[in-house]
Image (cartoon, helix red, strand yellow):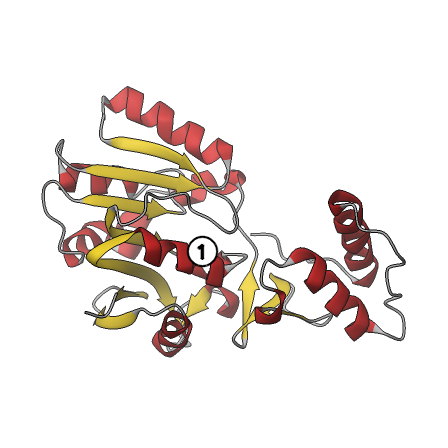
């Protein structure tokens, strides 16, 4: 992932671009001497629910400068990271089959792989739910979905549907999904509240959401802090959208599996 983020000049440029794209008129507040005013203006123009996000001029170089419930949102991995997603070492490092088993899936289940990337977990999920089940491979990047489509054709897999999501909506069917899986994705969502509200709407009764994230509680995990999530932070953020922690699995080498569900 890139290690640099916009400086104040770049933030001002972004504010001007947002204004032009949205048809807003008026003067953009000067960042010099009034960074908070500029941040507030950008937030109001850019955010679907502007009161939920804070923008700070000083932030982690690997972050976006946007904060949600005290946590800085990380940069999104681009399609150039596909080779890293499919690296041979990942099997040993992350134990993907153990992740799949921990999800408690059944033949015929409908699953969403949200932030599917290159499909590393998509096709494992497809095999688990079988031909009577379905996997929605959701991503906001067309290049990722194209890669999944090509792989499905090569493998002859017919129970995977590619879904082009947006920054605020995964475009999943209402009350149509048994489980939503996010592997090292949630911390990069630009609008976590909006996405998780839609995810909750997509869950069937007793539907679940599973997060696989690097353990922030463990300083020995060799991942930048911005790309880790603690169980406590996940619980705090899921409580806002009405999801409760029903199970946490801590058997993976560096990640935890944190599972949430709608309350009965």
Looking at the rendered image, the quarter that the C terminus falls into is: bottom left
The x, y position of residue 203, in whole percent, is 27, 54
Q: At x 42% / y 46%, what residue is drawn?
A: 170
Q: Is residue 171 above or below residue 47?
A: above
Q: Quadrant of residue 243?
A: bottom left
Q: In this rendering, does residue 117 appear at all? A: no
Is 212 left or right of 222, judged from the image as shown?
left
The x, y position of residue 153, in whole percent, is 30, 20
Q: Secondary structure at mark 1?
A: helix
Is 75 left or right of 29, judged from the image as shown?
left
The x, y position of residue 10, in whole percent, is 79, 55
Q: In this rendering, does residue 35 appear at all? A: yes
Query: What residue sits right under mark 1 in the picture?
Result: 195
| Of residues 220 and 81, the one drawn nearer to the viewer in this rendering | 81
Q: At x 36% / y 55%, what residue is drawn?
A: 199
Give neighbour class at mark 1: few <14, some 14-19, many 20+ (Cα, 10 Å): many
Q: At x 85% / y 67%, what residue is drawn?
A: 31
Q: Is residue 143 above or below residue 98?
A: above
Q: Quadrant of residue 74?
A: bottom right
Q: At x 26% / y 72%, what residue is drawn?
A: 245
């Amino acid at each position: 992932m890139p290690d640099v983020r916009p400086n104040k000049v770049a933030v001002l440029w972004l504010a001007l671009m947002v204004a032009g794209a949205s048809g807003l008129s008026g003067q953009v507040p000067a960042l010099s001497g009034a960074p908070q005013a500029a941040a507030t203006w950008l937030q109001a123009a850019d955010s679907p629910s502007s009161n939920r996000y804070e923008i700070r001029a000083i932030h982690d170089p690997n972050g976006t400068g946007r904060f949600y419930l005290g946590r800085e949102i990380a940069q999104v991995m681009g399609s150039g990271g596909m080779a890293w997603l499919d690296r041979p070492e990942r099997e040993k490092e992350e134990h993907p089959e153990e992740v799949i088993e921990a999800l408690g899936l059944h033949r015929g289940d409908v699953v969403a792989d949200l932030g599917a990337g290159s499909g590393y977990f998509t096709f494992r999920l497809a095999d688990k739910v079988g031909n009577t089940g379905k996997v929605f491979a959701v991503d906001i990047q067309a290049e990722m979905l194209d890669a999944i489509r090509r792989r499905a054709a090569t493998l002859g897999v017919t129970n995977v549907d590619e879904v082009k999501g947006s920054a605020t909506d995964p475009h999943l069917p209402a009350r149509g999904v048994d489980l939503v899986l996010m592997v090292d994705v949630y911390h990069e969502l630009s609008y976590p509240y909006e996405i998780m509200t839609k995810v909750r709407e997509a869950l069937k009764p007793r539907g679940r959401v599973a997060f696989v994230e690097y353990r922030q509680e463990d300083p020995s995990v060799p991942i930048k802090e911005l790309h880790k999530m603690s169980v406590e932070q996940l619980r705090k953020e899921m409580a806002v959208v009405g999801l409760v922690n029903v199970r946490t699995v801590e058997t993976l080498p560096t990640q935890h599996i944190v599972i949430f569900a709608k309350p009965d």
